[in-house]
Amino acid sequence: VSETYVDSIDTDSTNEINITKKLYHDSFFFSLLSTLNNKRLLDIDCGDGYMLKKLNSLYSNMELIGIDLPNMLNESQVTDNNIHFIGGDCHSLPFPDSSFDYVISSLMFHWVDDLETIVGEIYRVLKPQGKVITSNINPNTFHVGKWENLNSERPKYVLTKDVTKEQQFEVYLNKTVGPLTYNMRPVTKYKEVFEKIGFENIRTQEPLLEDPNVLKQYPNLKKYSFYPLYLFISGNRK
């Protein structure tokens, strides 16, 4: 799944996936991080280190570590000594307990089957009061319905699936990328898993796209000013 998904992401592309990632997803994701100077951060499912490079440009004296399957890593794209890559499996993180101040994960959880194991590993490697921040495709607006009146003043998303029940189905990201196995989990399910593992101060946030400059430049994204594309989940280890 990861390899197929990464093949669809080109950070220089102007297709909808990449525009929403850069101008909608990323700005909100980074707003959830407090000062990271002198902190140790782990990025799970880091790919080519895109998020780590962004963070490295914003903060100083950080230790940034990315983990992904060995065939997904591209260390040649990162030359900064603050960033390190490790090949491994997020179901069994190769780090001691209480190793990181922050653990982040961007748009991964909906592609994994065993969510509880991964969240448990995140909890284990976080320091006490350490923070996890994750993003996911919003389960209420991704392949669970159809858009209507896209060119009107108020587009409408009509559900065709029951979003209150956990489901698994095949999806295509575009005409050539797929099928991918998508795990549709209600927002309440994510919160339930985080609570079960032991996290506190859990927040689930579904921000709308409200930047007037982005909406003016990309009017096709107006639908996300009414229906959120992303779900963000954060919490602290006790």
Image (cartoon, rainbow, N blue to C red):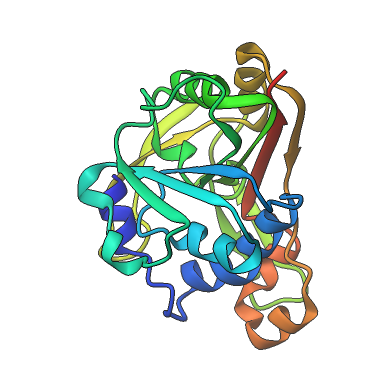
* Residue 82 in the image: above or below residue 45: below
In this rendering, does residue 178 appear at all? Answer: no
Residue nearest the viewer, comparing 19 with 238: 238
Residue nearest the viewer, comparing 48 with 181: 48
Q: Position of residue 126 (x, y in %)?
A: 59, 27
Give residue 79's quadrant in the image.
bottom left
Residue nearest the viewer, comparing 133 with 146: 133
Image quarter (top left, top right, bottom left or bottom right) of the C terminus = top right
Q: Position of residue 234 (x, y in %)?
A: 69, 36
Residue nearest the viewer, comparing 59 with 123: 59
In this rendering, does residue 176 appear at all? Answer: yes
Residue at 51% of width from left, 58% of height from top? 51
Q: Position of residue 22 (x, y in %)?
A: 57, 70
Residue at 60% of width from left, 46% of height from top? 138
Q: Position of residue 169 (x, y in %)?
A: 37, 36
Q: Residue furthest bottom?
A: 217
Residue at 63% of width from left, 22% of height from top? 194
* Residue 173 in the image: above or below residue 221: above
* Residue 124 in the image: above or below residue 221: above
